[in-house]
Image (cartoon, rainbow, N blue to C red):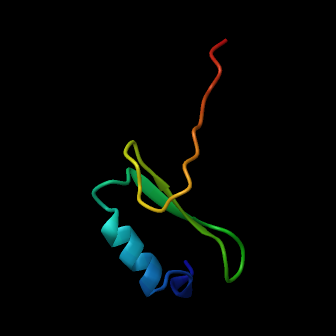
Amino acid sequence: MFPDMVNDMIRDLIARYRDVAAGWKLSGAGGGGYLILVSDRPVEGAVRVVVRRALT
Protein backbone atom coordinates (compact mmCIF):
# COMPACT_ATOMS: atom_id res chain seq x y z
CA MET A 1 0.00 0.00 0.00
CA PHE A 2 2.86 2.36 0.88
CA PRO A 3 5.96 1.18 -1.00
CA ASP A 4 8.25 3.84 0.50
CA MET A 5 7.42 2.65 4.02
CA VAL A 6 9.84 -0.27 3.65
CA ASN A 7 13.47 0.63 3.05
CA ASP A 8 16.61 -1.45 2.59
CA MET A 9 17.30 -1.59 6.34
CA ILE A 10 13.83 -3.03 7.02
CA ARG A 11 14.19 -5.51 4.15
CA ASP A 12 17.59 -6.61 5.53
CA LEU A 13 16.17 -7.13 9.05
CA ILE A 14 13.24 -9.15 7.72
CA ALA A 15 15.60 -11.27 5.61
CA ARG A 16 17.95 -11.81 8.58
CA TYR A 17 15.19 -13.04 10.88
CA ARG A 18 12.93 -14.73 8.29
CA ASP A 19 13.73 -18.19 9.73
CA VAL A 20 13.30 -17.07 13.37
CA ALA A 21 10.23 -14.84 13.19
CA ALA A 22 6.73 -16.28 12.96
CA GLY A 23 5.62 -12.92 11.59
CA TRP A 24 6.38 -9.23 11.46
CA LYS A 25 4.63 -5.87 11.18
CA LEU A 26 5.67 -2.29 10.68
CA SER A 27 3.97 -0.11 13.24
CA GLY A 28 3.87 3.66 13.56
CA ALA A 29 2.61 6.71 11.75
CA GLY A 30 4.32 8.76 9.11
CA GLY A 31 8.05 8.41 8.65
CA GLY A 32 8.91 6.51 11.80
CA GLY A 33 7.88 3.56 13.86
CA TYR A 34 8.87 0.05 14.79
CA LEU A 35 9.47 -3.30 13.18
CA ILE A 36 7.66 -5.82 15.35
CA LEU A 37 8.86 -9.43 15.12
CA VAL A 38 6.95 -12.31 16.69
CA SER A 39 9.20 -15.21 17.66
CA ASP A 40 9.40 -18.11 20.10
CA ARG A 41 13.20 -17.77 20.08
CA PRO A 42 15.31 -14.76 21.16
CA VAL A 43 16.04 -12.14 18.51
CA GLU A 44 19.45 -10.45 18.90
CA GLY A 45 19.20 -6.77 19.85
CA ALA A 46 15.44 -6.88 20.36
CA VAL A 47 13.37 -5.64 23.27
CA ARG A 48 11.58 -8.67 24.71
CA VAL A 49 7.88 -8.33 25.44
CA VAL A 50 6.04 -11.17 27.17
CA VAL A 51 2.33 -11.34 26.45
CA ARG A 52 0.13 -13.22 28.89
CA ARG A 53 -3.54 -13.93 28.79
CA ALA A 54 -5.40 -14.53 32.03
CA LEU A 55 -7.44 -17.68 32.12
CA THR A 56 -10.86 -17.16 33.65
Residue ID at (32%, 62%): 18
Q: Looking at the rendering, which quadrant does residue 30 occupy?
A: bottom right
Q: Quadrant of the C terminus?
A: top right
Farthest residue, direction front = 45
6 or 51: nearer the viewer: 51
Q: Is residue 31 above or below residue 19?
A: below
Q: Position of residue 28 (x, y in %)?
A: 68, 69
Q: Position of residue 29 (x, y in %)?
A: 72, 73
Q: Position of residue 27 (x, y in %)?
A: 62, 65
Q: Position of residue 14 (x, y in %)?
A: 38, 69
Residue ID at (62%, 26%): 53
Q: Quadrant of the N terminus?
A: bottom right
Farthest residue, direction top = 56
Q: Looking at the rendering, which quadrant does residue 55 occupy?
A: top right
Q: In this view, does 24 lie above or below 1?
A: above
Farthest residue, direction right = 29
Residue ID at (34%, 62%): 17
Q: In this view, does 45 lie above or below 38?
A: below
Instruction: Describe residue 11's horizontal placement relative to residue 46 as left or right.
Output: left
Instruction: Describe residue 1's horizontal placement relative to residue 33 as left or right.
Output: left
Q: Looking at the rendering, which quadrant does residue 36 occupy?
A: bottom right
